[in-house]
């Protein structure tokens, strides 16, 4: 059973930075997508950034390109968030799903690709 545990959320001022972590365990295959989603109040859940385990492909939502960076170190996936804006305020979730092929763009952001979800971590950007 795959388990995902997020950490690193909190309150930060506009323009500040945070790093989220997703500790993953229980993988039995070698090819997964691991993706950060977020849900802001009153909005639908949206894909933020994705990384694949076999070859390290990365994908980003247009709204975070140039500000966020996703990386992986063994079984932990990080989301470095810089130049944060109030509209980045949301609960951030880590999700994972097995792959047979590259998910492509925008396929990576489809929630139907993901079988496993973490509990989420709150990120609040406010002065």
Image (cartoon, grey):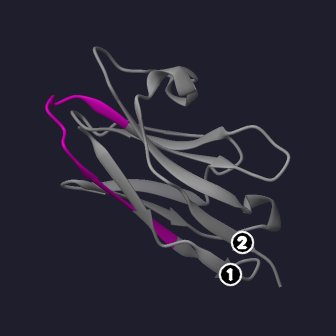
Q: Residue furthest top?
A: 100
- Residue shown at the point (74%, 73%) measured from the top left: 125
Percent from the top left, x then y, of residue 14?
77, 77
What residue is disc 1 on?
12
Image-based side of 90 in relation to 22, left or right = right
Q: Secondary structure at mark 2?
A: strand
What residue is disc 2 on?
124
- Residue shown at the point (18%, 43%) measured from the top left: 26
Q: CA distance from mark 2 to mark 1?
A: 6 Å
Q: State yes or no: discs 2 and 1 in contact (Cβ < 8 Å).
A: yes
Q: Is residue 65 above or below residue 73?
A: above
- Local crowd size for mark 2, using a 10 Å CA cut-off: few (<14), some (14–19), many (≥20): many
In front here: 26 or 54? 26
**First to last magenta residue range:** 19-33
Percent from the top left, x then y, of residue 118?
44, 49
Percent from the top left, x then y, of residue 5?
37, 58
Instruction: Examine the image and state in which quarter residue 88 appears.
Output: bottom right
Instruction: Examine the image and state in which quarter residue 114 appears.
Output: top left
In the image, residue 26 lies in the stretch drawn in magenta = yes
Q: Secondary structure at mark 1?
A: strand
- Residue shown at the point (61%, 60%) measured from the top left: 67
- Residue shown at the point (52%, 21%) measured from the top left: 112
In front here: 31 or 115? 115
Chief SS of the magenta region:
strand
């Amino acid at each position: 059973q795959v388990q995902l545990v997020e950490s690193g959320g909190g309150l930060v001022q506009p323009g500040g930075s945070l790093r989220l972590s997703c500790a993953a365990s229980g993988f039995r295959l070698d090819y997964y997508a691991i993706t950060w989603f977020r849900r802001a109040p009153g909005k639908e859940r949206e894909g933020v950034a994705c990384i694949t385990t076999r070859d390290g492909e990365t994908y980003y939502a247009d709204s975070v390109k140039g500000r966020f960076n996703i990386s992986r170190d063994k079984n932990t996936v990080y989301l470095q968030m810089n130049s944060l804006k109030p509209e980045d305020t949301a609960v951030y979730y880590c999700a994972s799903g097995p792959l047979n092929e590259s998910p492509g763009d925008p396929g990576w952001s489809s929630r139907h690709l993901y079988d496993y979800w973490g509990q989420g971590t709150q990120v609040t950007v406010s002065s």
